[in-house]
Image (spheres, helix red, strand yellow):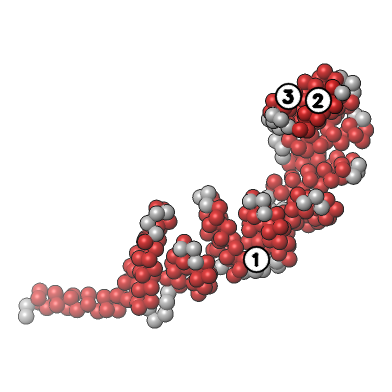
Amino acid sequence: MNRLLTSSVLLSLVAILIVAVSSRPLIYAFETNLGFVLLSKTINSQTQHNLLADAETWFQRSETMSDSMPVEAYQGLGLVAFHAGDDENASAHFRKAGLSAADMLAYGHTAAALNQPEDAQRWYKLTTQQFPNMGDAWYYLGLMYQEQGLLSQAQSAYAAGVSAPDRIEIGSSDLYFGLADMARLQNNYAYAQHLYEQALQSDSFSFQYAKVNTLDQLAAIYIRQQKYQKAIPLLEQAIDRSPSFDWPYFRLGTAYYLCCQDTERAISYLNQGIETSPDNPWGYVLLGDIYLAEGDRELARTLFRKSLELRPNWTVAEERLLAMDQ
């Protein structure tokens, strides 16, 4: 055998040995990746659901390539089950894959960003089932319920989040704010006040809108109670934090008029609110109320009619005009 042939045989033997040693992980990686490719095609097409079965086959084949099922394959099988609508098996596979709460929240956030609210809600719900002590999952689940008008479910989710000891992205104030909003929307103002106050006391907001809305809504409750001196500084804080938010201007103008009969300041704040949000009919109605109280009936009538142009057949404005004509 000449030297060239000998070298070729040796190289071939070395190649065979390399393949023999590494074939299982190489094939496993290949087949697992095929599963993810098919799964990706299924998700993107939203029509070729038969590909889910093919993806599942490739993930399961990975088991024969390893002494134990690789975590990536479990994760793939979990995703297959999830997109097939089988949350129970999805949860079981994700648990075996060792997915963390942060991993599952990320899937939920991605679905929400892709405008897939149903999938996002399922991800958040699965996260609460696997990680019941994770307050973030309860918060986002509460938001999903709230957007659907499911107030009792949202309230339960926020309450569970308040009690949950673990958090990644959000603070306790965000959960108190969500729970307070549910109480307010159900006209339980005493409980809402307590929760808004808890949110401000904790002062652990992760979202600017939550802090600003807490200040605004708590001030609104104080105004209902004629506690104007408690409401005014909260509304001033809200304006400082979010100058483009209209309602703090409206409430602040109303508060200054009711507490101090400061007509000039009240009109100034209401006009600022209208400039900020000219399409909000409430600004014109509240400003019309002040002009009517000050005796300028024609300007009040003009403002009430302006609000009706923005919201036709709005009983709030129609009742005011009717009362003026009686």
The Cα atoms of the two marked residues, 3 and 2, are separated by: 11 Å
Who's the residue at 67% across and 54% down the image? 150
Q: Is residue 286 above or below residue 232?
A: above
Q: Nearer the viewer, residue 240 or 219?
A: 219
Residue type beneath disc 1 = Met
Residue type beneath disc 2 = Leu
Q: Which residue is mark 3?
A: 306
Question: Label 2 neighbourhood size at 10 Å, few (<14), some (14-19), many (20+)?
Answer: some
Q: Which residue is mark 2?
A: 321
Q: Nearer the viewer, residue 174 or 224?
A: 224
Q: Position of residue 325 (x, y in %)?
A: 84, 22
Who's the residue at 49% across and 63% down the image? 85
- Mark in the foreground, 3 or 2: 2
Q: Position of residue 241 (x, y in %)?
A: 73, 41
- Mark in the foreground, 3 or 1: 3
Query: Which residue is the extreme one toward the left?
Result: 1
Q: Quadrant of the N terminus?
A: bottom left
The Cα atoms of the two marked residues, 1 and 2, are separated by: 52 Å
On screen, residue 167 versus residue 183, left or right, reads: left
Query: Which residue is the extreme one toward the front?
Result: 326
Query: Which residue is the extreme one toward the right?
Result: 260
Among the 4 quarters of the image, the one containing residue 275: top right
Q: Which residue is mark 1?
A: 134
Q: Is residue 1 above or below residue 118?
A: below
